[in-house]
Image (cartoon, rainbow, N blue to C red):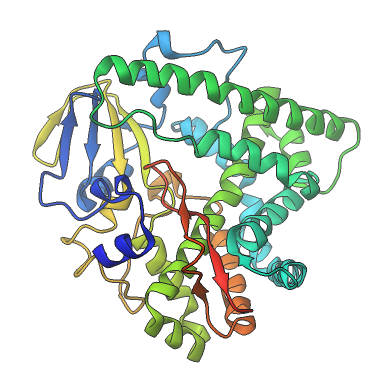
């Protein structure tokens, strides 16, 4: 792994937290005022106990850091909701991601991949993220939701503002610096959030007047316990689907191509045996986990990894570290698509397992197969450096120029 970090100049903050650790699997960070979980079995315990480890992290955020509900609402944001409400809301969109619905999208994904590659054919250099890894999943999820995929520049602007902020406050900052940084982050997050909310509120209002056969109409017409979803919940559900529905695939595809460039012998094997592509993707998800961390909050005092965590504490679950825990994954720094089993946690585990995982895997498999068909060699451009998403809680390329089409 050290060779990869040096070769691509990966920001060190992505790995001093994410790599296999010789230290404790659970530890408290007094500077940040939160607990960090790095170990694989410990993370299984957290994700398997939503009663003790609540997804509602806002309940432990200091009130003075929270914006007013008029400016920033998380109502209906399923990643922040616990049972039993979580199960009811999850059922509303689970029908959109069934095995059959997802598999039926394969011809459309393949056609889009060819269209995007054709459009980029005459450019001097092919840049994977801009030309394919970003627009492909955005178009697919936008078509599912029923919003114009032609607005994807807007979606990217909002996603960049929310997820790709420069890490101005380090994990070693003082409490005052962290406090000020969180307040600034909240203020900055409200701007794109408000723009997205207004955008999707307009589309939701139009669906109430003129329903269509799309997911946004299903959300508008959905009922929980006999009541229609409030407007805030409809909009926040749509925001989550639009953002998480494309960002994971964008990072998955970029990271997998990076791995095949770094390990050319594995690229040769994937070319010779296309049936191995799913295993290549799974190993990429393990080694370069897109969403590197998940937040939880304790509802009671609990023992985890030999330490006691009090009630009402913020817990940061480092999925990327757990996916490289040598207790679970032998030789964890190696890129080994033949690793079997490969029970990584890149899509979570338990009740919050990612609904869009089957779609992300399908998009990655189809796109990677077509890239291998159309490129003699997937090679990064040494004259045009790879650029990574600057925040340490996400592992993914922001820019990945490739040579030779």
Of the 4 image quadrants, the one containing the C terminus is bottom right
Which corner quadrant of the image does residue 193 belong to? Answer: top right
Residue at screen point 38% across, 50% down: 349
* Left or right of 200, for residue 339: left
* Left or right of 325, for residue 184: right
Residue 222 at what x, y percent from top left? 71, 35
Residue 226 at what x, y percent from top left? 68, 28
| Residue 158 to residue 44: above or below | above
Which corner quadrant of the image does residue 31 belong to? Answer: top left
- Farthest residue in the top direction? 64
Q: How many marks?
A: 0
* Left or right of 330, for residue 386: right
Residue at screen point 47% across, 23% down: 185
- Farthest residue in the front direction? 383
Choose between 235 and 117: the one closer to the eye. Answer: 117
Residue at screen point 49% across, 89% down: 273
Which corner quadrant of the image does residue 391 belong to? Answer: top left
Residue 223 at what x, y percent from top left? 69, 32
| Residue 80 to residue 378: above or below | above
Inspect this view and state whether residue 48 appears.
no
- Farthest residue in the right direction? 210
Choose between 251 and 209: the one closer to the eye. Answer: 251
Residue 241 at what x, y percent from top left? 62, 43
Of the 4 image quadrants, the one containing the N terminus is bottom left
- Farthest residue in the bottom direction? 272
Inspect this view and state whether residue 209 appears.
yes
């Amino acid at each position: 792994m050290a060779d990869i970090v040096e070769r691509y100049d990966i920001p060190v903050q992505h790995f001093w937290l994410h790599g296999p650790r010789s230290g404790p699997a659970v530890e408290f960070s007094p500077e940040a005022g939160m607990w960090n979980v790095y170990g694989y079995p410990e993370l299984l315990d957290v994700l398997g106990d939503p009663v003790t480890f609540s997804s509602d992290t806002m309940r432990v955020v200091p009130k003075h850091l929270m914006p007013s509900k008029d400016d920033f609402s998380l109502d209906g944001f399923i990643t922040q909701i616990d049972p039993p409400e979580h199960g009811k809301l999850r059922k509303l969109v689970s029908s959109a991601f069934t095995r059959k619905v997802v598999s039926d999208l394969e011809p459309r994904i393949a056609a889009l991949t060819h269209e995007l590659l054709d459009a980029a054919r005459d450019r001097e250099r092919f840049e994977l993220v801009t030309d394919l890894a970003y627009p492909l999943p955005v178009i697919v999820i936008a078509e599912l939701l029923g919003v114009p995929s032609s607005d994807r520049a807007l979606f990217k602007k909002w996603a960049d503002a929310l997820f790709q902020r420069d890490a101005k406050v380090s994990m070693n900052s003082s409490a005052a610096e962290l406090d000020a940084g969180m307040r600034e982050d909240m203020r900055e997050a409200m701007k794109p959030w408000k723009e997205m909310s207004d955008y999707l509120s307009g589309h939701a209002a139009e669906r109430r007047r003129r329903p269509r056969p799309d997911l946004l109409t299903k959300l508008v017409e959905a009922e929980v316990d006999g009541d229609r979803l409030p407007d805030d919940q409809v909009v926040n559900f749509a925001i989550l689907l639009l953002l998480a529905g494309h960002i994971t695939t964008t990072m998955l595809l970029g990271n997998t191509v990076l791995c095949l460039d770094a390990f050319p012998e594995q690229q040769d094997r994937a070319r010779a045996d296309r049936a191995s592509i799913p295993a290549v993707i799974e190993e990429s998800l393990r080694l370069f986990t897109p969403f590197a961390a998940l937040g939880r909050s304790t509802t009671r005092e609990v023992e985890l990894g030999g330490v006691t965590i009090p009630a009402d504490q913020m817990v940061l679950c480092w999925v990327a570290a757990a996916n490289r825990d040598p207790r679970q994954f032998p030789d964890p720094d190696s890129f080994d698509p033949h690793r079997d089993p490969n029970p990584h946690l890149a899509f979570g585990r338990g009740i919050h397992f990612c609904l869009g995982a089957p779609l992300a895997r399908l998009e990655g498999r189809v796109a990677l197969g077509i890239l291998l068909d159309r490129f003699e060699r997937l090679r990064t451009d040494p004259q045009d450096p790879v650029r990574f998403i600057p925040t340490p809680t996400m592992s993914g390329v922001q820019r990945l120029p490739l040579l030779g089409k």
